[in-house]
Image (cartoon, rainbow, N blue to C red):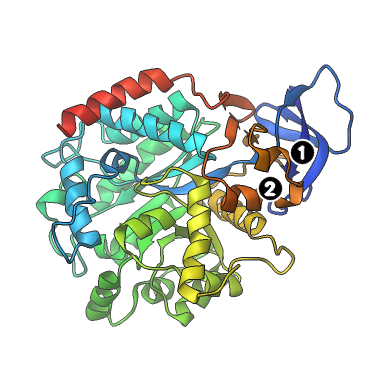
């Protein structure tokens, strides 16, 4: 048992873990990695571990393709005036075509350390690279997923592994192209692989497992229903959907329905589901997702990088929708950046200020933080943070920054989100264990050296 003390802490004293408030002179107790008690307005004593700076819960990053961190910045050369997601995808295919399991582990380890430093302590790893480079399963079908889990174990990042079913190149069961041979599986092979992952993860305190479909264009409803009928046990269910206008148009051409409209009509979409991107929605789809209780995974910096468009967050929140954020292709690894540009995107689109707020929470930073916390945890199947019963995941901000040390508590999240460009996250704890200590991870040097070798070898 460890008792921590903070002069200022952003804690939830409710049973719902989604109403956070600033409190002074806070003591909280961690036993076996979970918060068992929170007291406010207490006097510190010598038995407490004192946290030097404001203390806040961390967030869950609900959407990650870890290997894509390797190619960040490598698709930014203007060779085609019609560059889009689809031309970026060709660069991604080339990057992934020959990656080895040991390289995947190093890349994921490097990424997860960066994400820990950026305020995330759980990551939804949307994992669709299953096969050997020439296609076909590894002798151990879980080989690449195990590399991801080892990266989580090494870095102390919690991983919600989401092995993705990927079968086709487009609507109408188009045959996969050469760039997709590492992704494709039969439905039966997917189910067998998933069961193997269940065995690997069943005793983990930090890791979780969820069902995942790459997209409506990459599988079909029969396969999805077979998977859900066989494996659904209340775990998270993730799917890419309506990210690109071309996807919406192709879906309309094939089915006569828009992607989200079609999904909602065929499946019992509920709070287990996380709809990744859902960028291009009509009013009926916005209301349909919100009413279902599903979360939307907004990946602001990646969506901007790919030119996807603006998610209708203002309208979705007005309908009562749940959302979280993910860093997806990892052109950014910062919770701050994902939230900042989500709000700025809405301002640019609507040409108005202060777009995302709650009826009882006019502070934009607090509202965005709370929404991303709730939606991210829901999508990753975890409860983390500073509330009783939650896994004790939290961060400590540096008081060397005047906007942190001198600001009133009520202004801290707005100062952080809209006033700071430098990282003030000094320490990060996962399950009560310090994993980032004074901005450093114990594996920084070793992982950086290994990552440097991969970058130099692959991008000479």
Occupied quadrant, residue 452: top left
- The one nearer the camera, 150 or 65, is 65
Across and down, in percent, residue 297 comes to 46, 58
Residue 310 lies left or right of residue 35; in this view the side is left
> In this rendering, does residue 60 appear at all?
yes
Across and down, in percent, residue 403 comes to 66, 43
Tell me the residue at 15%/44% (across/down): 94
Marked residue nearer the N-terminal end (2 or 1): 1
What label does residue 8 carry, if any?
1
In which quadrant of the rendered image does the N terminus lie? Answer: top right
> In this rendering, does residue 299 appear at all?
no
Residue 433 lies left or right of residue 160; in this view the side is right
Tell me the residue at 52%/40% (across/down): 422
Across and down, in percent, residue 378 comes to 56, 52
- The one nearer the camera, 441 or 408, is 408
What label does residue 274 carry, if any?
none
Q: Secondary structure at mark 2?
A: helix
Q: Secondary structure at mark 1?
A: strand
* Circles 2, 1 touching at the beta carbon (< 8 Å): yes
């Amino acid at each position: 048992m460890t008792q921590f003390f903070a002069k200022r802490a952003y804690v939830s004293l409710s049973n719902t873990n989604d109403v956070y408030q600033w409190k002074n002179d806070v003591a909280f107790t961690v036993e076996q990695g979970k918060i068992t008690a929170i007291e406010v307005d207490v006097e510190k004593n010598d038995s407490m571990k004192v946290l030097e700076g404001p203390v806040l819960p961390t967030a869950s990053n609900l959407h990650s393709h870890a290997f894509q961190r390797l190619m960040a910045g490598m698709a930014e050369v203007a060779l085609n005036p019609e560059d889009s997601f689809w031309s970026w995808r060709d660069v991604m295919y080339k990057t992934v075509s020959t990656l080895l399991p040991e390289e995947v582990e190093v890349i994921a380890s490097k990424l997860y350390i960066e994400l820990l430093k950026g305020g995330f302590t759980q990551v939804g790893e949307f994992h669709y690279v299953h096969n050997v480079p020439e296609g076909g399963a590894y002798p151990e079908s879980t080989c690449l997923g195990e590399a991801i889990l080892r990266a989580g174990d090494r870095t102390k990042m919690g991983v919600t592994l989401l092995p993705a079913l990927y079968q086709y190149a487009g609507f109408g069961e188009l045959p996969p192209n050469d760039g997709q041979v590492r992704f494709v599986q039969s439905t039966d092979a997917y189910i067998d692989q998933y069961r193997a992952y269940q065995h690997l993860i069943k005793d983990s305190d930090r890791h979780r497992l969820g069902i995942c479909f790459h997209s409506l264009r990459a599988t079909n409803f029969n396969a999805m229903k077979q998977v859900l009928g066989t494996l659904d046990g209340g775990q998270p269910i993730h799917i890419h959907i309506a990210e690109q206008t071309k996807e919406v148009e192709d879906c309309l051409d094939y089915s006569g329905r828009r992607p989200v409209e079609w999904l909602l009509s065929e499946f019992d979409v509920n709070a287990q589901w996380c709809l990744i991107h859902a960028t291009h929605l009509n009013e009926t789809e916005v209301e349909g997702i919100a009413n279902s209780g599903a979360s939307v995974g907004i990946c602001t910096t990646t969506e901007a990088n790919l030119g996807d468009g603006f998610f209708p967050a203002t309208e979705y929140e007005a309908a009562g929708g749940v959302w979280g954020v993910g860093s997806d292709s990892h052109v950014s690894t910062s919770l701050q950046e994902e939230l900042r540009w989500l709000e700025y995107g809405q301002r640019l689109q609507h040409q108005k200020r202060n777009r995302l707020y709650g009826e009882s929470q006019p502070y934009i930073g607090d509202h965005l933080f709370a929404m991303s916390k709730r939606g991210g945890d829901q999508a990753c199947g975890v409860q983390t943070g500073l509330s009783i019963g939650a896994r004790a995941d939290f961060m400590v901000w540096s008081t060397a920054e005047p906007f942190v040390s001198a600001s009133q508590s009520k202004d801290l999240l707005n100062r952080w989100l809209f006033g700071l460009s430098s990282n003030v996250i000094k320490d990060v704890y996962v399950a009560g264990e310090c994993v980032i200590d004074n901005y450093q991870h114990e594996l920084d040097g070793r992982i950086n050296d290994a990552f440097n070798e991969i970058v130099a070898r692959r991008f000479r």
